[in-house]
Amino acid sequence: MTKYTINNLPKIRGEYIFDEPLKKHTWLNVGGNADVMFCPADSDDLRNFIKNKPKEMPVFVLGGGSNILVRDGGIEGVTIKLKSKNFADISIQDGCISCGCGLINSQLKKFLPQHNIGGLEFLCSIPGTIGGAFASNAGCFGKELKDVLISALVMDGTGNIFTANTGDFNFAYRHSDFPQDWIILEAKLKVFEQKADITEEIIRKNDEYRRTHQPQNIRTAGSTFKNPEGYRAWELIKNAGGDVLEFGGARFSPQHYNFLQNDGSATARDIEKLTETIMQNVFEQTGIRLEPEIKIIGKPKE
Ligand SMILES: Cc1cc2nc3c(=O)[nH]c(=O)nc-3n(C[C@H](O)[C@H](O)[C@H](O)COP(=O)(O)OP(=O)(O)OC[C@H]3O[C@@H](n4cnc5c(N)ncnc54)[C@H](O)[C@@H]3O)c2cc1C
């Protein structure tokens, strides 16, 4: 049971949900509860919460839940979910678009051709939200967030809102390094004029590639590990016995060994054991240390 109640939390206009099962909010469909889930009405509501919340209360921001493994003991404190449509605005200015952090990337699939613009086709095919793309400098098809980001509107842990530039995020391959208490509110992204049919064709080809090369309709979080320089993670996994490894209902997908999957009966512990075991096996076989791309958060079950 959570120690937080409506009486020790700031008054807000959005919604508090107590003991919310996080498996409902993640693609892997495992994990314990959030003590409290807070869904702010808008950025003023979020700011009011951040300024007035109990000082010691930890905060975690959840995007689309497509790149996280929540442990079975859940997440302490408040998990913020920016699901209000006020966090999903999108508008065009000169040579760029402004997107709210809660915008689901795939919503760009309609918007880009409707406005005869291109440049963000790669982003449309990545599950999750604009805000979530910052944590791992999300990318595919030869492009990453850092290539298209102009600036971002950010709220820090004291509720200050300011503009951060690309350099402030220290982006690298599937990596960024910005202060833990930053909440991305909005991103300004570069686009260029491009006929609708060209944009649509690139999006179609990208989707087709995913359909034919990656497992579909499974409980996964995408690539489990980063590709070590000069190697492909899926090959290292397969060669180290990942094709037969299984814990509970967790195993690597035979269609793409770097995608792990929950067959429906796995716990977060099963999934974590699978990742730890393959990391150890690959290290013993090759001396290479696989680095997780998935973010593992929360506490183990007591
Ligand atoms: C089938 C599949 C395919 C995938 N393919 C790719 C791919 O091709 N390329 C790729 O890069 N990734 C891929 N991924 C991984 C994932 O989709 C991306 O990492 C995505 O950007 C995560 O976004 P999200 O909104 O789901 O974030 P979440 O998983 O909810 O969160 C990820 C991190 O972002 C932080 N975060 C979320 N929102 C905010 C915010 N507003 N402010 C601050 N921090 C925030 C969270 O705290 C967490 O640390 C794939 C995943 C799946 C399931």
Image (cartoon, grey):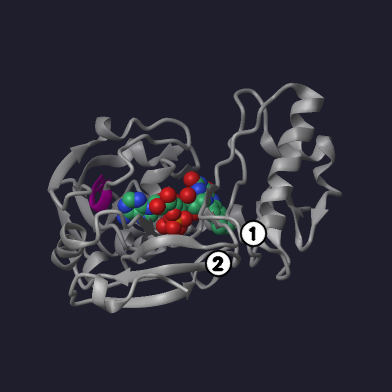
Which residue corresponds to the image point at 74% horizontal and 27% vertical from the top-left? 283
The answer to whether 37 is drawn above or below residue 47 in the figure is: below
Check contact, mark 1 vs mark 2: CB within 8 A.
Answer: yes
Say left or right for 138 vs 188: right
- On the question of residue 211 being in view, the answer is yes
Q: Is residue 158 left or right of residue 220?
A: left
Question: What amino acid type should be assigned to the residue bearing mark 1?
Answer: Ala
Residue 107 versus residue 145 in the image, above or below: below
Q: Is residue 190 magenta?
A: yes
* Residue 129 percent across, percent down from the top left: 38, 58
Q: Residue at x 61, y 40 (%)?
A: 225
Decide if residue 104 is in sight here: no
Q: Identify the residue under disc 1.
A: 268
Distance, label 1 to label 2, CA atoms, is 9 Å
Residue flagged by tag 2: what amino acid is it?
Gly
Residue segment shown in magenta: 183-192
**Horizontal and vertical percent for residue 141?**
50, 42
Q: Main secondary structure of the magenta part?
A: strand
Q: Secondary structure at mark 1?
A: helix
Residue 85 screen position, x and y as percent = 26, 72
Residue identifier under label 2: 32
